[in-house]
Amino acid sequence: MKIVVLAGGNSTERDVSFSSGSMIYKALKSRGHKAILVDVYLGYEGELEDIFERDTDWTAQVGAIGEKSPDPETLRALRKDGGKKFFGPNVLELCEQADCVFLALHGANGENGKIQACLELLGIPYTGTDYVSSAMAMDKGISKDIFKAYGIPTPAGIRLKKGERETEHIPFPCVVKASCEGSSVGVSIARNEQEYLAAKEEAFRYGDEAIIEQYIKGREFSVGIMDGRALPVIEMIPKMEFYDYKAKYQAGSAVEVCPAELSQEKTLEIQDIAERVFQALRLKSYARIDFMMSESEEVFCLEANTLPGMTATSLLPQEAAAAGMDFAELCQRILDNAIRN
């Protein structure tokens, strides 16, 4: 099949997206697909004719993931139009030529449903869940409201608009999060008022709403979901305070154990909650659900990721491997779901 792997974009997770896209592209090529890797934001300005037939290494533009997320503002100077439009030159034209678009995007304007809605209006098949469930899962405030409505355990928390007067307070230590970012971008732990003010300022760099929630001290886990069924549980053990952007993408910054060393009872509990989250958010095809377990072994769901990382250090491929599915097979299964649905 002719496949466009869409990566890059203008979110804080641009570098991660390129790494995911590169691995997906290579996996699809190994399966015999006519795949190309395209930066959704900067686009492609070369000749389009017979583009899927060319012997081109489309990963040449991909760099390594840095220790910090990139600044999206620096990208605007690279666009002739100053970045007024999201889609770069010829991106939609290439997508319309393809049999399917494999979404390797992460973060805002990748996981928030906008691209999914655009592709849907154009009648272009794409991987992952639909635009409605993407939007609900990307917004941590909406997700938390849904978790509460469905009886899914989640840390106590509040939604705070920028400039809004606080009428409710979460005791220190607390976690402050940007409402619509991923990869722990805009996430801080605050132990006092000074740290709290700095954490809010950092979170509001990424949007007009922040989530303030109870800090859970304990172990961190994640569960991949394929077609509504949970994969083996993985535990993330960061070498710093918490599983932040660096720990997720810099080799050696965390230890990851899959299957996680848990009792069968606790494993089944976490997997069951993950499947319930998948259903509550109306997710489709695949996702990854993140958890904390307190020192008293109480489980809390943090969030759902609708386009989880597919890098060399990513969690979902590790979980799939523990279930007997190699990376190329995982990509093929995701692709098959998109074509079938």
Image (tube, rainbow, N blue to C red):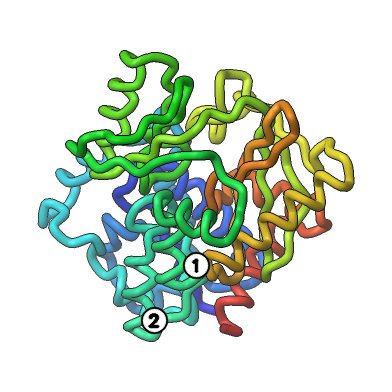
Outermost residue, front direction? 167
Instruction: State the residue at coordinates (67%, 70%).
Output: 227
Q: Can residue 85 be seen by looking at this rendering?
A: yes
Instruction: State the residue at coordinates (40%, 47%).
Output: 61
As measured in the structure, the alpha-carbon distance from the residue carrying label 2 to the one carrying label 1 is: 13 Å
Q: Secondary structure at mark 2?
A: helix
Q: Residue 231, which numbered label?
A: none
Answer with left or right where residue 63 lies relative to residue 309: left
Instruction: State the residue at coordinates (57%, 71%).
Output: 284
Q: Can residue 67 be seen by looking at this rendering?
A: no
What residue is shown with label 1?
102
Outermost residue, left direction? 81
Q: Residue 97, which numbered label?
A: 2
Q: What x and y, as percent, mark residue 109? A: 33, 57
Answer with left or right where residue 282 lies relative to residue 190: right
Q: Give above or below for 250 relative to 59.
A: above
Q: What x and y, as percent, mark residue 278? A: 60, 63
Q: Closest to the observer: 4 or 325?
A: 325
Amino acid type of disc 2?
A: Gln
Mark 1: few/some/many CA within 10 Å (<14, 14-19, 20+): many
Q: Give above or below for 223 relative to 31.
A: above
Q: Which quadrant would the N terminus be assigned to in this image?
A: bottom right
User: Sequence order check: which comes first, mark 2 or mark 1?
Assistant: 2
Q: Closest to the observer: 335 or 115?
A: 115
